[in-house]
Amino acid sequence: MARLRLFLTVPEPFLLVNHFMQFFDLCNIFELNGEPSEDNPYLFNGDFVDRGSFSVEVVLTLFAFMCLCPESLRLIRGNHETSAMNKLYGFDGEVRAKYNGKLADLFQEIFCCLPLGCVLGKKVFIVHGGLFSKDGVKVEDLKSIDRFHEPPDEGPFCEMLWSDPCCEPGRYPSKRGIGIAFGPDVTKKFIIENNLELVIRSHEVKDDGFEIEHDGSLITVFSAPNYCDQMENKGAFIRFESDMVPHITTFNAVNHPPVRPMQFAPHIF
């Protein structure tokens, strides 16, 4: 993992997925679109763990495909690939319950090695969270970030994991208390300054599994259907072929064993 670049540059075609702490829905995506391979590569845009009770099975499956065929699957770090979130939302407890503390600590080391974003086909900018609190950020600048630690509470590293789009122009404090809310003017300026065409991010549940915003310049994709067995949302994934046009597929949740979400989270939940 440490050998992976901070910011990936990935050729097309590619299938973009995110939010897959729900193991049986992950298996369903592989049924719908085929297993990862060199001819059918996947990009997972963060939040592989937490909130579900089968996060260990999810992340070990993803790592297994990476070991079997490194070109078949790429991972980007999300805000839940962090120590504080894992302790709060269940992944740390799940690993310790199913295995041991040594493996839980090892996962934290691995998460600190994950890339923070991706440029697909030189035209599509992909991060888990969103854009930045200042103008003038270039993709080349992002490649110099030291990623081998827990994210800070502000700055580009933090914002790539935590920021969200909003409808109004400009920048605003985030409702999450971390990162920012950024408007369509921010997205368009970033795209122009970096010679891009589209921003794709995840980080927020959407009723239809996706939402196209900022006059078509930004897409949110959310791949966990019926999130936490409560939200009744669809899941979605995006496939890019050589034409670099996003082809969106939506799907419903599948059944899973009767284990409640966040089974291993602290008792306050």
Image: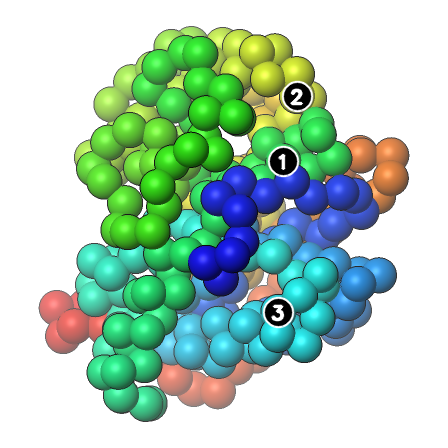
In whole angstroms, how far apart are the C-alphas of marks 3 and 2?
28 Å
- Image quadrant holding the C terminus, namely bottom left
Q: Name the residue under label 1.
A: 119
User: In the depicted view, which residue is nearer to us: 183 or 68?
Assistant: 68
Displayed quadrant of residue 212: top right
- Residue at numbered disc 3: 66
Amino acid type for the residue under numbered disc 1: Val
Disc 2, disc 1: CB below 8 Å? yes
Rate crowding at label 2 as few (under 14), some (14 to 19) or many (20 or more) other CA atoms within 10 Å: some
How many numbered markers are drawn? 3
The vertical placement of 166 against 221, above or below, is above
Q: In this view, does 264 lie to the left or right of 48?
A: left
89 or 205: nearer the eye?
89
Element at label 3:
helix
For image coordinates 57% across by 11% down, the residue present is 193
Amino acid tagged 3: Met
Residue designated by label 2: 196
The image shows residue 246 at horizontal and vertical percentages of: 75, 38
Q: In this view, does 196 lie to the left or right of 107?
A: right
